[in-house]
Image: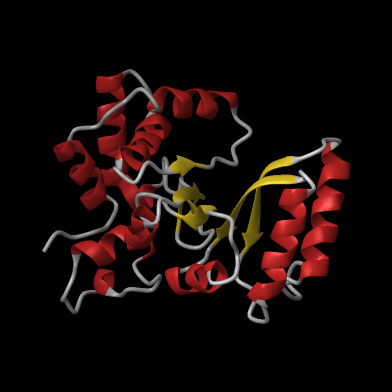
Amino acid sequence: VPGVMYDCSKEHILESVDGILKRLQTEYLDVLLLHRPDALVEPEEVAEAFDLLESSGKVRHFGVSNHKPSQIRLLKKYVKQDIAADQLQFSIPNSQMVANGMEVNMLTEGAADRDGSVLDFCRLEDITIQTWSPFQYGFFEGVFLGNPKYAELNRILEELGEKYGTGSTGIASAWIMRHPANMQLIAGTMKTSRLKEICEASEIVLTREEWYRIYLAGGHILP
């Protein structure tokens, strides 16, 4: 129930999947994600639900969203299936998971480890990071593309867009996909033009210098 509670109980997971299948008019889901950690989660129940969903053929792969390493480890103590993905907020300005690895042993804001080094953890465990709100800054404060608050960032995105024959959306997407973690970008856009640029970004490989120029323009520092 949005704004009321999270529910990762066995009963709720099974009921939710049946409801999703009915609404989508399909027989199975390729991937099911547990959306945000439930403070009252009982991983034994999650494991039972996953086993039933897998054996019945209703779900083929399983993942989580907004989970940190210790929460995934707790699930994995009981869940036998691989955790295929962790869906996390990530964009050029919202790249704390990169910054805390860059500003190690510093007293800067970026050094704060708020996610348990989830980026490194997912790479070590072969868990795909799926990035949500890839064009937002802050927590739903707005889009940074074309925003005067990020004038220098947008100038660089436009400059590189001309070089690579795409727009700012394409370069912002290419920046995410340039990271060696092989992240999957999740775009909520309904604009055909923006989707076209995101597709174009899959063919763009930014240079190391370009990637860091964008990172710094997004408000980060290099020690």
Residue farthest top in this picture = 165
Q: Position of residue 144 (x, y in %)?
A: 42, 48
Q: Quadrant of the C terminus?
A: bottom left
Q: How many marks?
A: 0
**Left or right of 115, for residue 63:** right
- Image vertical order of residue 113 relative to residue 186, above or below: below
Could you say which is closer to the camera, residue 203 or residue 143? 203
Q: Position of residue 208 (x, y in %)?
A: 17, 38
**Left or right of 66, for residue 18:** right
Could you say which is closer to the camera, residue 46 or residue 16? 46
User: What is the basis of the colouring in this image?
Assistant: secondary structure
Q: Position of residue 69 (x, y in %)?
A: 43, 69
The answer to whether residue 49 of the structure is visible from this angle is yes
Residue at x 25%, y 37% (from the top left corner): 156
Residue at x 76%, y 72% (from the top left corner): 9
Q: Quadrant of residue 191?
A: top right
Residue at x 50%, y 67% (from the top left corner): 72
**Left or right of 222, for residue 149:** right
**Left or right of 126, for residue 28:** right
The answer to whether residue 1 of the structure is visible from this angle is no
Q: Quadrant of residue 219?
A: bottom left
Q: Quadrant of the N terminus?
A: bottom right
- Image vertical order of residue 172 relative to residue 37, above or below: above
Q: Position of residue 182 (x, y in %)?
A: 37, 41
